[in-house]
Image (cartoon, grey):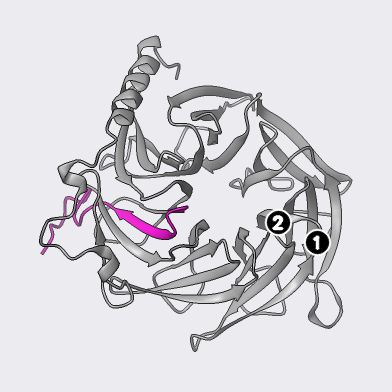
Amino acid sequence: MPMRPFALLSLVASTTACAAATAPTAAERPAPDAPAAADLDPRQGEVPLPSAVPDWYASLVVDNAPTGIWTVEAVPFFAHHACPEVIGLDDRGRCLVCVSYSGKWTPRPAIEDGKWLGGLAHADVDPRLAGAELYTGGELGNLYQVVAYENGAMDCRRIACLPGCEIHTIVAGELDPASAGPELLVFTQPGGLYRVTPTGPDGTFETALVAALPGRVRDALVLPDPGGGPPEIATVSRAGWLRLLRMTASGPEWTTVHEGPMGEGRLDVAPPRPGRGTVLYTGLDDGRVLRHERGAGGAWRTETIYLGPQGVRGLAAGRFHADPGVETIAVFGYAKKVQILARIGEEWEVETIFVDRDKGHWLAAAELDGRNATDELLASGYGARIVLLSRPPGYGRSELTER
């Protein structure tokens, strides 16, 4: 629905108020008698961190200081575990598989490539292995497959090398009708799109350059299947566009949803709702957050929903409000703040829920705490740690209270 003129003005006012609060408030500081987080080990027990508001709880998953963690996601890596594992990719080229057990988190390094890792995908791509595999790559152009086993072991191998290319983004699935079965689509810098398939001899993979691209794709996701035809892949680029990609038998086909003179860095899709088309959110380098909704006829409508701090580097859609009818997303970036944007009526309200110790780089929504009715958030970046943000027990649930 259209935003009333005063709604955007209220966002600017909210942003200004948030920016003015540069010093930690009393709510942000740990209690005087609480042990410092640096003295606690999340492998031994839950480590609380100071949050900016009382109805969000922050805790430490891993402290990787001084090495930044550029990408974080939650995936069911060990299939025999009910709780997803948290995967972090750091500046030393390590893939950290963080395993949860009753509030404790144990990081297990799977790779050490020497330079940063960035692209990450989890899918059943390799038919020669049971279940889904983890795929990652980074600055050196090495692409890795990481496999988990039921006895808790894991191993990795390099399945491709793209010399002179940085691997920034990976998507996986049955995406390209030009190849049989599932594949990986790998986006690189310099701008390129590669297809990697498990069709090589003796268990190897084959790599093919599909197309050169104008600029680096920084984020991509496979959209829910609309029914019929190849899947759509939403992509955002440093070149300043949001485009939908379809792989066809004759090659890639692109549809531009939005384009402008400012780089687009992060992307997410809203949870589906009856009677509403696909909704995408994008974060721009200048601090804008855009909402893109596809109408019944296929046309896209784009609106600005937030004018925030420059350098949006994390964006996650999900349910973060007690009322499931309230549309919410979370943003994170160079201002160090994790903020929740909530659409109340026709206006968007902004709340800062956590301030990290350095610039943010990634944000992911996950289901890691069943005591509330909402999603959790995972934040990582220059602060060299992964932080879990959750609503308190009982939030959004009326049938039970904390015991």
Q: Is residue 372 left or right of residue 251?
A: left
Callout 1 environment at 10 Å: few (<14), some (14 to 19), or many (20+)? some
Callout 2 environment at 10 Å: few (<14), some (14 to 19), or many (20+)? many
Q: In which quarter of the image is residue 298?
A: top right
x and y percentages locating residue 116 in the rendered image: 62, 61
Question: CB atoms at circles 2 and 1 under 8 Å apart?
Answer: yes
Of residues 377 and 284, the one nearer the viewer is: 284
x and y percentages locating residue 17 in the rendered image: 29, 26
385 in the magenta segment: yes
Residue under the point 33% across and 18% down = 10
The C terminus lies in quadrant: bottom left
Residue 186 vertical position relative to residue 111 in the rendered view, above or below: above
Residue that carries the numbered disc 1 in the rendered image? 162
Residue under the point 78% across and 68% down = 160
Give, as a three-letter code, the residue at label 1: Leu
Of residues 280 and 308, the one nearer the viewer is: 308
